[in-house]
Image (tube, rainbow, N blue to C red):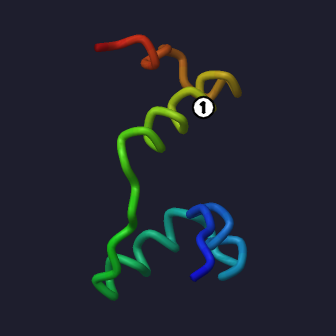
Amino acid sequence: MILCTLGQASKLAKINQRQFQFLLGSREISVHYDVAEFESDLKTLHEMGRLSTDFTNIE
């Protein structure tokens, strides 16, 4: 089994991530996305300046 990110998978499908997530949902395919990945995404978005609040230190 080959694992890839949601972004990589959407690029392979040649559609944006939102459309890809909708497609997965419409086919009842779950996305494995755990808390650590979510926190990593929040950190990345913050570092990119796309998220104005730093949520990485919230407990």
Report the residue that reaches farthest toward the front: 1
Q: Quadrant of the C terminus?
A: top left
Q: Nearer the viewer, residue 12 or 33?
A: 33
Q: Is residue 12 above or below residue 40?
A: below
Q: Position of residue 2 (x, y in %)?
A: 62, 78
> Which residue was labeled with disc 1?
45
Between 39 and 24, the one nearer to me in the picture: 39
Q: Is residue 42 left or right of residue 15?
A: left
Residue 22 % position (x, y): 40, 73
Q: Say above or below: 29 vs 5.
A: below
The image shows residue 52 at horizontal and vertical percentages of 54, 17
Give the position of the N terminus as an image quadrant. bottom right
**On the picture, is 34 further left or further right than 13?**
left
Q: How many marks?
A: 1
Q: Is residue 10 above or below residue 37?
A: below
Label 1 Cα crowd, 10 Å radius (few <14 / some 14-19 / many 20+): some
Residue 54 is left or right of residue 33, and the answer is right
Give the amino acid at mark 1.
Leu
Which image quadrant for residue 39? top left
Rendered view: 45 above or below 59: below
Residue at image location 32% in from the left, 83% down from the top: 26
Q: Position of residue 53 (x, y in %)?
A: 48, 14
Q: Residue at x 44, y 69 (%)?
A: 21
SS assignment at label 1: helix
Residue at 37% across, 49% down: 34
> Which image quarter: residue 24?
bottom left
Determine the residue positioned at 51% across, 73% down: 20
